Amino acid sequence: MMEVDDEISRQTQIIRPAIRPYPAQYEQHWLSKKGRVLLIRAIMPEDEPLVVDFHKRISEESVYTRWMSNMQYDERASHSRLIRVCHVDYDRDIALVALDEESCAGKNCKLVAAGRLTKMHGKNVAEFSVLVEDDWQGEGLGAKLLLELIKHGEADGLDGIEGIVLPTNRAMIHVAEKMGFESVYDKELNVVKQYFSYKEAAPTSKAKEDYDIQLRRFTCPINI
């Protein structure tokens, strides 16, 4: 009888939750290059109205740069799509959002940027995406979100992260390369394929050095 109890106890100890809990560890306040305060955290199901409003403020150019197509607002902001965007399976994805802290002090909290990492089927690699509202571009926010995604992928044991961007998206290409991504232009598809390898980012490499510099720069939260 004691052996049965011991086995039940052992099995109980190794049981893992079926669904990962909400990753509260990503919540932080962060100061942009222009001195604006943001709250960065993982997305929540109740963020859907904020995402709808976010898409109202995204320019056609930013939409095309992100999706490489002129995805219409009605499609981007549809409930059937956003219910998948805002309800995250944290075993597969991580989705981070940045909120304007000043607007959140009132009743009109604004979501101004989002970043996502989605595991790909059949390999231990995830695809990244980042979208920043036009009025908030150039403040280091895209770099901050990308860095948080890189850190998450490393903690999750991924082999690498990849993404596909347009050649005209020079800002994202530059930021990613500074953090250690390799960029390869695909002439046939007219896109730039970017890949970050955790295995190849050796401590002695220039990419790792740049990554460490960015790590120190973009992970300095503020206390408010």
Image (cartoon, rainbow, N blue to C red):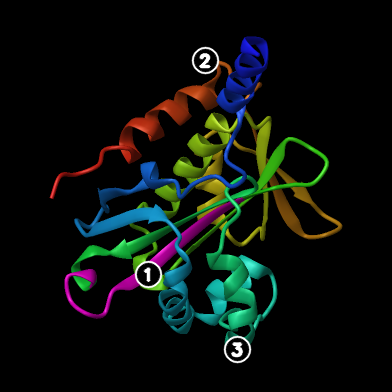
Q: Nearer the viewer, mark 2 or mark 1?
A: 1
- Identified by mark 2, the residue type is Pro
SS at mark 1 in the image: strand
Q: What element carries label 2?
A: loop
Residue 180 % position (x, y): 56, 33
The residue at the point 47 percent across, 61 percent down is 114
Sequence-first tag of 2 and 3: 3
- Locate residue 188: give its quadrant: bottom right
Q: From this viewpoint, which residue is outermost toward the left?
A: 224
Does the residue at mark 2 contact the one at mark 1 (Cβ under 8 Å)?
Answer: no
Q: Label 3: which residue?
A: 74
Q: Which mark is residue 203?
A: 2
Residue at the image point whose x is 66% and y is 10% from the top? 3
Report the residue marked by disc 1.
Answer: 111
Rendered-image quadrant of the N terminus: top right
User: Of 131 and 82, which appears nearest the observer?
Assistant: 82
- The magenta segment is 104-117
Residue 75 picture quarter:
bottom right
Q: Residue at x 38, y 45 (%)?
A: 26
Q: Which residue is drawn at 53% across and 66% down?
A: 86
